[in-house]
Amino acid sequence: MTKDKAEAAPKPKGKFKKLLFIGVGALVLIGAGAGAGIYFGALSAHEAKPEDHYPKLVVRSVGDEAPAAEGEDKEPALKVGTVAVPNDKFKIDPRKYDVTYYPITDAFTTNLADGSGFLQAGISLSTFYDGKVINNIKRQAVPIRSVVLMVLAEQDPALLSTSQGKQRLQRQLTGAINDVLREKEGFGGIDNVYFTSLVIQ
C-alpha cells in the first residue's frame, strides 16, 4: 500500500500544474483579446467619417440672401456646413450659397486643332463649396493644366469666334476639370470656368 500512496502523491501536483497552466493560458488569451479590442476600437474612433472627406456647401449669410422673386416661395434657410452629397453633379442654387473664385495664374497657350494658329486663354474657376475644393485644385494643378491644354487644343477657331462656341468651351473645361478632380480626389465641385483672357490667332 505504501507504493500506492507514493504514486498517488505526484498526481495532485500534476493536476495542479495542469490547472495552473490552463488558468494562465486563459488569462493570457483574455488579456490579448481585450488589448486587441482596445487597439482596434481606438483606431476606428480616430478614423474620419466618410462624409468628412467631401467638401461642404458654403451657405450665404442671412443678410446676403437675394430677395425671392414674386410668386416664388421662400425656402427655409439651410444650416451652415450642410454636407454635400458625394455626387456633385446636381445644380446648385446660387442665391443660397456663396461662390468662391480661384484664378489660375498662368495662361494656357496651345496650337489649334486645324493647325491654323494658336489659342491663348486665362481662366478662373468658381465653386460653391468650402476650401477643400480649392485645396484639391492646388494639389491637382498639373493634371488640371494638362486636361485644359488638351481641351483647348481640340478647338475649332471658327466655333470659338461665336458666343455659343465660347460657352461650349466653358462647359467642356468645367466637365474636364471636374473629371480630373473626381478621379484624383473623389469629388469635383467646380461650378463654372470663366475666361479672364482669350486670344485666338
Image (tube, helix red, strand yellow):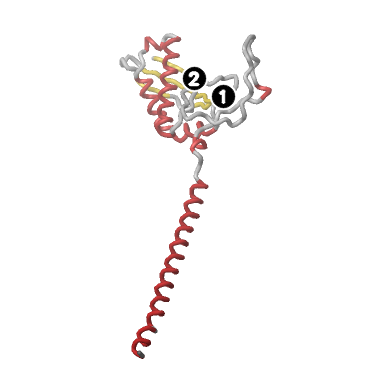
Determine which of the numbered discs, if any, sits on residue 186 in the image: none
Is 182 positioned to the left or the right of 82 in the image? left
- Disc 2 crowd rating (10 Å Cα; few below 14, some 14-19, many 20+) is some
Determine which of the numbered discs, if any, sits on residue 99 in the image: 1
Q: Quadrant of residue 108?
A: top left
Residue found at x 62% / y 12%:
72
Q: Nearer the viewer, mark 2 or mark 1?
A: 1
Circle 2 SS class: strand
Residue found at x 46% / y 22%:
122
Coordinates of residue 14 in the picture (x, y in percent): 38, 78
Q: Nearer the viewer, residue 149 or 187?
A: 187
Question: Which image quarter holds the C terminus?
Answer: top left
> Which residue of the protein is positioned furthest toward the bottom in this rendering?
2
> Which residue of the protein is positioned furthest toward the front in this rendering?
1
> Which residue of the protein is positioned furthest toward the right in this rendering?
63
Residue type pointed to by label 2? Tyr
> Which residue of the protein is positioned furthest toward the left in this rendering?
114
Circle 1 SS class: loop
Q: CA distance from mark 2 to mark 1?
A: 13 Å
| Label 2 sits on residue | 194
Residue type pointed to by label 1? Val
Residue found at x 50% / y 22%:
191
Q: Nearer the viewer, residue 193 or 27?
A: 27
Coordinates of residue 62 in the picture (x, y in percent): 67, 24
**Compared with residue 69, is residue 84 higher up or lower down, i.e. above or below?**
below
Is 127 positioned to the left or the right of 173 in the image? right
Q: Quadrant of residue 15?
A: bottom left
**Compared with residue 164, is residue 19 higher up or lower down, i.e. above or below?**
below
Coordinates of residue 9 in the picture (x, y in percent): 39, 84
Residue found at x 54% / y 25%:
128
